[in-house]
Amino acid sequence: MSDIPDVTLDIRSSNCGTPAFPTPATLVPGTPNPGNLTYSYQYGGGSDGAGNVQVVTGAQHQSFKVKSVADRRYHFGGVDIDTGSTQISAKDLKDHEVTIDDADEKAEVDYYKIKVKDTGNGDCEFYCDPRVQNVLPP
């Protein structure tokens, strides 16, 4: 059982009428973007309140959910693991939620990217990426 707080993801587009978040999203190469929009995002929750997760190595298998708190037009389209790690994986992918599993076998920093699809802009796809860090016990 995990005691890691869930992570939230909020997204804004350049036409939403509110200021952008500080972190710009990266468009998936070749994605359609008929509205010529830019996107920004902000994570919350996790271990640090900013969406990053830290697990003490040896705490055994951990998992947490990433939940969208953005407009419902944004759908999760997949999760890419950036570091080649076999410690973290994604499961139970839904339009607005995914579970990230961490085997917690050794100390390392892993990054995952959630691919988000804007169903209101020709299914334009972009990435949003926080980190998972396994640290040695004190």
Image (spheres, helix red, strand yellow):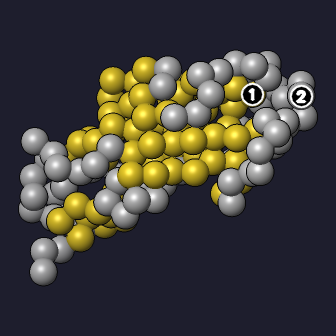
The residue labelled by disc 1 is 124
Disc on res. 35? 2
Judged from the image, the secondary structure of the residue bearing numbered disc 2 is: loop
Q: In the visual, does 80 lie left or right of 46?
A: right
Question: In which quadrant is the N terminus drawn?
Answer: top left
Coordinates of residue 3 in the picture (x, y in percent): 17, 49
Q: Residues within 10 Å of mark 2 (few under 14, many from 20)?
A: few
| 98, above or below 12, in the image | above
| 77, above or below 44, in the image | above
Can you tell which quarter of the image residue 73 is in?
A: top right
**Mark 2 to mark 1 CA distance (whole Å):** 9 Å
Disc on res. 11? none
Badge nearest the viewer, 2 or 1:
2
Is 74 or 117 nearer to us in this picture?
A: 74
Identity of the residue furthest to the bottom in this view:
138
Could you tell me which residue is drawn at 69 percent across and 26 percent down? 118
Q: In the visual, does 49 lie left or right of 16?
A: left
Coordinates of residue 102 in the picture (x, y in percent): 25, 48
Question: In which quadrant is the C terminus drawn?
Answer: bottom left
Q: Earlier in the sequence, mark 2 or mark 1?
A: 2
The kind of residue tagged 1 is: Cys
Q: In the visual, does 75 lie left or right of 33?
A: left
